[in-house]
Amino acid sequence: QDTLAVSVRVAPLGSQLVLVLVEDRTEARRVDAVRRDFVANVSHELKTPVGALALLAEAVLSASDDPDAVRRFAGRMQKESHRLTNLVQDLIDLSRVQGDDPLAKAVPVDLGEVVSAARERVAEVAEARSIEIVAAGADGVAVLGDRGQLTTAVGNLVENAVNYSPDRTKVVVSVRVEGELAEVSVTDQGVGIPDQDLNRIFERFYRVDPARSRITGGTGLGLAIVKHIAATHGGDVSVWSVEGAGSTFTLRLPVAVQAPAAELHPTTPA
Ligand code: ADP
């Protein structure tokens, strides 16, 4: 609910004069609350895999004469460490994109190259699960920005498409230009997203199905990172989804205006 928070300070200026300072603290209070929530969420998310690792280590120690059990526990320890690594990586990505203005040192970035790098990130997992990743659309489309951040954004979308799809399905990553905007769309034939969750999935730590997210090693931060990168690059990200049929995530970014070749290489009149 919207409540107004004010701080009032009174300073006597003389026998008949006082100075009254009224400051609107509403926004500062909101920022404090968001920060507290974030720290609480991070602590909770860290506690779960660390707690599981401690228990599993104990289990390994007490099952040392049963090699099968040791192998099983070690496998689960591997999964929990993977989750922990993902979480730390996403936290690093989030803090990096929040601290940087990518447009301050923007360079033209070719979206075809970004898509290739993003595909590479998931190639091994996709191949193991017979998920075909198809790249389609325009070549030579560039946007202004930070190559690493743009690869993170497209990579997170492609990674989700793979994570939330059954084996032997297809993911299509396409690039096209609509007026002054370049669009990168990632379409999957996966589980889809219920209508009531669509406008919450870009929130930090929001997951439609926490149990599934745990299996995939998801952190709930991927889409928040994509949203932030899109916004700081002057664009946005949107989603269209049908539950049980699949989803399309579309990243829209302003096309880099490229100087025509004639301007780059002026020809001297004969
Ligand atoms: P996570 O690390 O859990 O994948 P994200 O922030 O990337 O976190 O996504 C938030 C939630 O949105 C996911 O937990 C999942 O429920 C849903 N989601 C994201 N991408 C897809 C997709 N392509 N298909 C179905 N659900 C998705």
Image: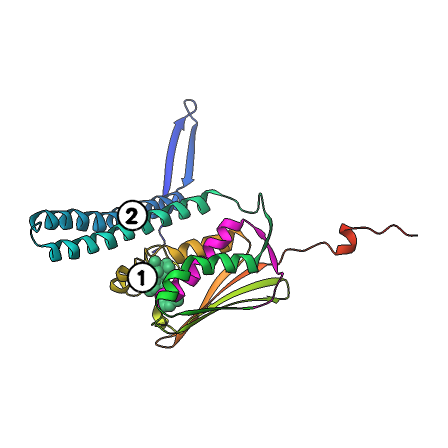
How are the colours assigned in the image? rainbow
Determine the main secondary structure of the stretch shown in magenta: helix
- The image quadrant of residue 105 is top right
Residue 245 locus on image (x, y percent): 38, 77
Q: Verify CB contact (< 8 Å) between mark 1 and mark 2.
A: no
- Which label sits on residue 51? none
Q: Image point 37% across, 36% down: which residue?
A: 8
- Is residue 215 shown above or below 62? below
Is residue 4 among what the camera can see? no
- Is residue 223 shown above or below 190? above
**CB of mark 1 near ligand 1 (< 8 Å):** yes
Q: What kind of residue is marked 1?
A: Arg
Residue 267 locus on image (x, y percent): 84, 52
Q: Which residue is mark 2?
A: 42
Q: What kind of residue is marked 2?
A: Val
Residue furthest right as drawn: 270
Would residue 76 be found to the left or right of residue 217 on screen? left
Q: Which residue is mark 1?
A: 207
- Real-space CA distance between mark 1 and mark 2, rounded to the nearest whole angstrom: 14 Å
Q: Which residues are magenta?
A: 137-164
| Camera-nearest residue between 144 and 110 | 110
Q: Secondary structure at mark 2?
A: helix
Which mark is first along the chain, 2 or 1? 2
Q: Image point 39% across, 61% down: which residue?
A: 124
Q: Is residue 140 magenta?
A: yes
